[in-house]
Image (cartoon, rainbow, N blue to C red):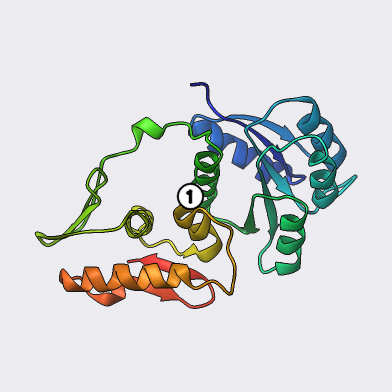
């Protein structure tokens, strides 16, 4: 399968180039645009697997780009918004955005979001190359049978519980926010009124504590998300 083709529409040339270089290092093909009009024209006239779209752009802003794009194409779009700009995120979803990334962002999270969205749309690059095992400190995870071990004690998890723990353990010490985890783990859009992620995290924590893991290793970072330490 060819590498996923990603269009980056971002007016900050330094950030644009950094993202392009990092994505290329992960095997993606990238194309770069630096204003809204150029980005819209490129998005409409070429074929992309995913578009990273900044909100604040010269020419026309990201919302108008998305609005015009959705008249002809359903290409997955990840909006890049200012941290805490909830109104922008809501507006983006209304106009057809598939996800958003708050600035400033961690590139690991950007890559995870991109891969999660590509999986959801059936365009994942390496579905057959997912590692079957993950081991960090005393924890071992086996993807095939959804089995988790801690200090030689083991238990089976549900598919969602396993994906949640795997994602957190794989990104040890990084706070992963709820909107990302909703998409990567639950494969649905985040809602502040939905408590399903909290419920799954609570079950994961109880199972790990029963195996002997200290509860604080799966920590809640209030107002942000969760972290495995």
**SS of the residue under disc 1:** helix
* Between 57 and 144, the one nearer to me in the picture: 144
Extreme-left residue of the structure: 152
Establish if 146 lies above or below 18: below
Give residue 204's quadrant in the image.
bottom left
Q: Residue at x 22, y 47 (%)?
A: 145
Residue 194: give x, y in percent of width and height.
Answer: 54, 71
Q: Quadrant of the C terminus?
A: bottom left
Residue shown at 68%/53% (left/top)?
A: 80
* Along the viewing direction, whichever of 182 and 31 lies nearer the viewer: 182
Residue picked out by circle 1:
108
Is residue 101 left or right of 86 when viewed as pictured? left
Residue positioned 67% across, 69% down in the render: 84
- Number of numbered discs on residues: 1
Q: Is residue 79 left or right of residue 202?
A: right
Local packing at callout 1 (Cα closer than 10 Å; few below 14, some 14-19, many 20+) is: few
Where residue 30 appears, as percent x and y from the top left, is 63, 30
Where is residue 134 drawn, in percent x and y? 26, 48
Instruction: State the image quarter where residue 131 is shown.
Output: top left
Q: Is residue 106 above or below residue 16?
A: below
Which residue lies most toward the right here? Answer: 59
* Left or right of 84 on screen, residue 2: left
Work out which residue is located at the far top of the displayed protein and give it.
1
Closest to the observer: 189 or 138?
A: 189
Q: Is residue 49 above or below residue 192?
A: above
Query: Where residue 63 sits in the image (x, y, percent)?
Result: 81, 52
**What residue sits 85% from the left and 48% below the top?**
64
């Amino acid at each position: 399968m060819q590498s996923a083709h990603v269009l980056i529409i971002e007016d900050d040339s330094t950030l644009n180039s950094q993202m392009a270089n990092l994505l290329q290092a992960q095997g993606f093909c990238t194309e770069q645009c630096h204003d809204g009009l150029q980005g819209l024209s490129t998005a409409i006239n070429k074929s992309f697997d995913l578009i990273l779209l900044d909100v604040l752009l010269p020419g026309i802003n990201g919302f108008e780009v998305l609005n015009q794009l959705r008249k002809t194409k359903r290409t997955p779009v990840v909006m890049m918004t200012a941290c805490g700009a909830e109104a922008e995120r809501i507006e983006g979803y209304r106009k057809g955005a598939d996800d958003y990334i708050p600035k400033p962002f961690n590139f690991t999270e950007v890559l995870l979001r991109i891969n999660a969205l590509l999986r959801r749309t059936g365009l994942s690059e390496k579905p057959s190359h997912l590692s079957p095992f993950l081991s960090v400190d005393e924890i071992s995870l086996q993807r095939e049978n959804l089995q988790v071990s801690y200090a030689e004690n083991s238990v089976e998890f549900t598919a969602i519980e396993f994906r949640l723990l795997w994602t957190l353990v794989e990104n040890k010490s990084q706070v992963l926010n709820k909107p990302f985890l909703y998409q990567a783990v639950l494969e649905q859009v985040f809602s502040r009124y939905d408590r399903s992620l909290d419920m799954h995290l609570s079950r994961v924590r109880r199972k790990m504590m029963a195996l002997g893991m200290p509860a604080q290793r799966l920590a809640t970072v209030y107002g942000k998300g969760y972290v495995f330490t």
